[in-house]
Image: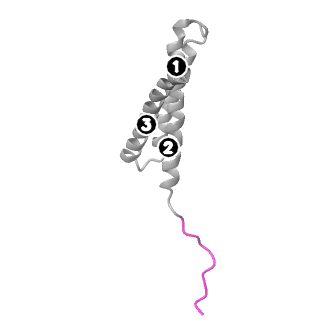
Amino acid sequence: MDELLKHLDNWEVVLYISLACIVLTVVVNLIFGKYRFVKYIPGMIFIFVGLFNFFSVLDSLTEAESINNLSLFILLVVGGIIGLLSALIIGIYNKPIKKKKGIKADKD
């Protein structure tokens, strides 16, 4: 049980980064609500920065110095995916309702 508790410290950081990305996505959506695609940008930025950290240590992947960049890669990619999913949820929630055109009901 002690070994499991040592690894749970990292999940607090994942939680904070995920919440930060969700809050950033909501704020961007509130500021730029007219443009639908803008709410996806914070999640994509998190993922691109995470991938940049991964590709920067790709040659020395097994060395001890690259552990910080690998953990940053995991944190940012997970936060970015959660940000993209929250943007998708916001997009589904704010989707305009289209009225169906077609057969009208008879008034008999």
Image disc number at residue 86: 2
Image disc number at residue 19: 3
Q: Is residue 107 above or below residue 37?
A: below
Q: Quadrant of the C terminus?
A: bottom right
Q: Position of residue 58 (x, y in %)?
A: 60, 12
- Identity of the residue drawn at 54% across and 35% down: 81
**Callouts 3 and 1 close, C-beta under 8 Å:** no
Image disc number at residue 13: none
Please tell me whether residue 76 belongs to the stretch shown in magenta.
no
Which residue is situated farthest in the right direction here?
103
What amino acid type is highlighted by mark number 2? Ser
Q: Position of residue 48 (x, y in %)?
A: 52, 26
SS type, badge 2: helix
Q: Could you give the CA–CA distance between mark 3 and mark 1, rounded to whole angstroms? A: 18 Å
- Identity of the residue drawn at 58% across and 90% down: 107
Relative depth, front residue between 20 and 104: 20
Q: Main secondary structure of the magenta part?
A: loop
Image disc number at residue 71: 1
Q: Quadrant of the N terminus?
A: top right
